[in-house]
Amino acid sequence: MDDPEGPSEVIARPTRGHATGEPPGIGVTMAQRWAIDAPAKLNLTLHVAGRRSDGYHELRSLVCGVTLADRLVASPAAMNATTVACNHASIPLETNLAYLAVQRLRAKTGCREGLHLELTKRIPLGGGMGGGSSDAAASLLLARRAWDLHLTDEQLAEVGAEVGSDVPLFFYMPSAVITGRGEQAASVRMNWSGWFVLVHGGVNVSTADVYRRWSQSGSGQLQPDRTDEALRATSARELCACLHNDLTEAVFAVAPAVQSLHAAITQSFRNRGFGEKPSLPHGRGSVVQQRPTTAAPPPFHLTGAGSTFFAPLDTEAEAGELARRIGDAKLKARVEVVRFLPSALVVEPQT
């Protein structure tokens, strides 16, 4: 989950029938617009095993995608140009991971064909949901289709790893286990798939500050890794028992507003009678009207090193009810219901 450095071993191959040795994209015109949704991710488990000799942290995490997504559309641009139009003005081009990923791919393949990206951001910045990394992976998939590159997902993931450690995992959706510093990913099949309630704190948390804090105070308090148990879970209740994030206390220390939000979520449950027992019959021949029993809500967990909390539910109705109750508490937070991502990322023609 730290930004990587180092060379890539990806080798460009001829495209669109080029057999003359010309770099791909020369003398061809991109006539099609392509689109893709770049999904957010949730770290269902996040185990930090310690700091490595190279300064990165050794991780193991079960990650799933959700239906909250940014949207990218690719269209032709001037030769050799990579341009990005984004609805979020606070993301400068030189730090936009979608732009950086396309530029890295262009350098690796020698492709000269222009590419313009329209990026509509929906995933909160700094929320720990991997929006920038997902955009980078999605932009590589768009460029491969637009430029007709003969590269595998694995080769694109290698390029993505040079841009950010979280980028490769998005080639292995809808669920994956990541290891190393986060750049090693393998697709896995979870027994459970359902719904999530998300509560976004709106705080842009610095990942570097969180890991620095963890190294200072958390490295001596290693927690057990319950990733394998989470994979076997068949219900939201079973999954909740396995969820953990070793970075939670470090995030709370770096961003007290995130801890305050968690406390406010918990207090809203208490104020609104979650888990209270119904009233009992009162006196002979009379019954006090009973309130419907409300099951205790699932605990909310932090994803990644960000400010978004999530809770898994088995059905859309349960998730909607929980989201409504949190919304009624008037917290200063964005609350929404999303679904477990049903499939891998797909590039589609844009009409």
Image (cartoon, helix red, strand yellow):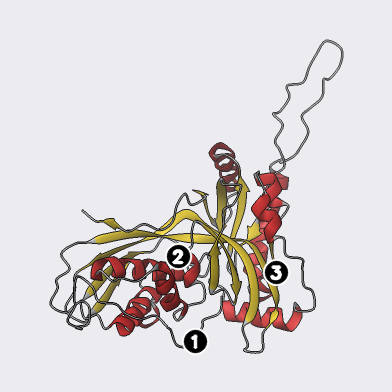
Q: CA distance from mark 2 to mark 1?
A: 19 Å
Q: What amino acid is labelled 3 in the image? A: Asp
- Near-viewer residue (214 or 153): 153
- Horizontal and vertical percent for residue 85? 28, 70
**Image: 54 above or below 118:** below
Q: CA distance from mark 2 to mark 3?
A: 25 Å
- For residue 246, which numbered disc appears in the image? 3
- Horizontal and vertical percent for residue 314? 60, 41
Side (left or right) of 198 relative to 76? right
- For residue 171, which numbered disc appears in the image? 2
Marked residue nearer the N-terminal end (2 or 3): 2
Marked residue nearer the N-terminal end (2 or 1): 1
Alpha-carbon neighbours of circle 1 within 10 Å: few (<14), some, or many (≥20)?
Answer: few
Q: CA distance from mark 1 to mark 3?
A: 25 Å
Side (left or right) of 75 relative to 61? left
Give the residue at mark 1: 5
Numbered disc 3: secondary structure: loop
- For residue 241, which numbered disc appears in the image? none
- Horizontal and vertical percent for residue 165? 52, 76
Q: What amino acid is labelled 1 in the image? A: Glu
